[in-house]
Image (cartoon, grey):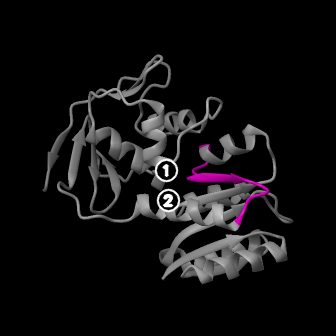
Amino acid sequence: MRKILIVDDDQKTRVLLKTYLEKNQYEVILSHNGESFLAELHAHTEQLSLVILDVMLPDTDGFALCKQVRQRSNVPIIMLTASSDETDRIVGLELGADDYIAKPYSPRELLARIKAILRRTALETPSARYYRFVGFTLDLMERKVLDNAGAVVALTGLDFQLLKYFVEHPGVILDRSVLCEETRGRDAGPLDRSLDVQISRLRLRLNDDGKQPALIKTVRGAGYVFSADVSVSHA
């Protein structure tokens, strides 16, 4: 059974989500503030399948918690925000969140987002294990990226999924709708900057110059292209 950790200061919301998700075969751990969330995170980090963070909390905020989660785990994160301001969503994505939902939302919508993220991050038996490119190795089996020194590159589940898609399609111009569908399970609206934020974050992790990127290039009016040579192997 997939285990989900939720932090929200509204008791009715917590009870509603717990009841709804448990009916859909998820194990749910609830927290009411940042302190209790961090205690549960420490106790269950290795068993968690997903984390849901409310942005507004009485003793801290979801952004601070997102940053702390990313310091110890690549577990997928969904952020809940009551603000219609795009800034909140961008900040969350820059800190490593995998998705966000604006309040008010329905439990059914949240469940759909959870299923989409878990489906995309599920470990599959790959036809090849390693993808090597310009000083990096992407390991599909372990779901991690290593640099030349053997150090693990810190990536969120969403970052990994995007990079995986790029290395599987080197030299191919990929439009925004394809990339959003692959990483988020939905198309992006004309004003949705979440993909651009994710691309910028991935470039940063791969030391790809944001002003003149050589690895993930922007093709104006068309999308993005992964320009590196990629070798594929099982060992």
Residue 234: which quarter of the image?
A: bottom left
> Which three-letter amino acid code belongs to the residue tagged 2?
Ala
User: Where in the figure is residue 125, as x and y percent of width and height?
Assistant: 24, 64
Q: Residues within 10 Å of mark 1 (few under 14, many from 20)?
A: some
Callout 2: helix, strand or loop?
helix
Q: Earlier in the sequence, mark 2 or mark 1?
A: 2
Residue 32: which quarter of the image?
A: bottom right
**Residue at the image position 34 percent from the left and 65 percent from the top:** 123
Q: Which mark is residue 185?
A: 1
Q: Which residue is mark 2?
A: 116
- Relative depth, front residue between 230 and 173: 173
Q: Is residue 65 left or right of residue 72?
A: right
User: Where in the figure is residue 196, as x and y percent of width and height?
Assistant: 55, 32
> Which three-letter amino acid code belongs to the residue tagged 1?
Gly
User: Where in the figure is residue 128, as x and y percent of width and height?
Assistant: 17, 54
Q: Is residue 133 visible?
A: yes
What range is drawn magenta here? Answer: 94-106
**Residue at the image position 37 percent from the left and 53 percent from the top:** 152
Q: Is residue 97 visible?
A: no
Q: Is residue 118 left or right of residue 110?
A: left
**Residue at the image position 57 percent from the left and 79 percent from the top:** 24
Q: Main secondary structure of the magenta part?
A: loop
Q: Looking at the image, do the residues carrying marks 2 and 1 touch, with CB atoms under 8 Å apart?
A: yes
Callout 1: helix, strand or loop?
loop
**Residue at the image position 48 percent from the left and 76 percent from the top:** 46
Q: Residues within 10 Å of mark 2 (few under 14, many from 20)?
A: some
Residue 141: which quarter of the image?
A: bottom left
Q: Is residue 97 depicted above or below 200 in this figure?
A: below
Q: Is residue 115 left or right of residue 108?
A: left
User: Where in the figure is residue 60, as x and y percent of width and height?
Assistant: 80, 61
Q: Is residue 111 depicted above or below 103 in this figure?
A: below
Q: Does the magenta-highlighted stretch encompass residue 168?
A: no
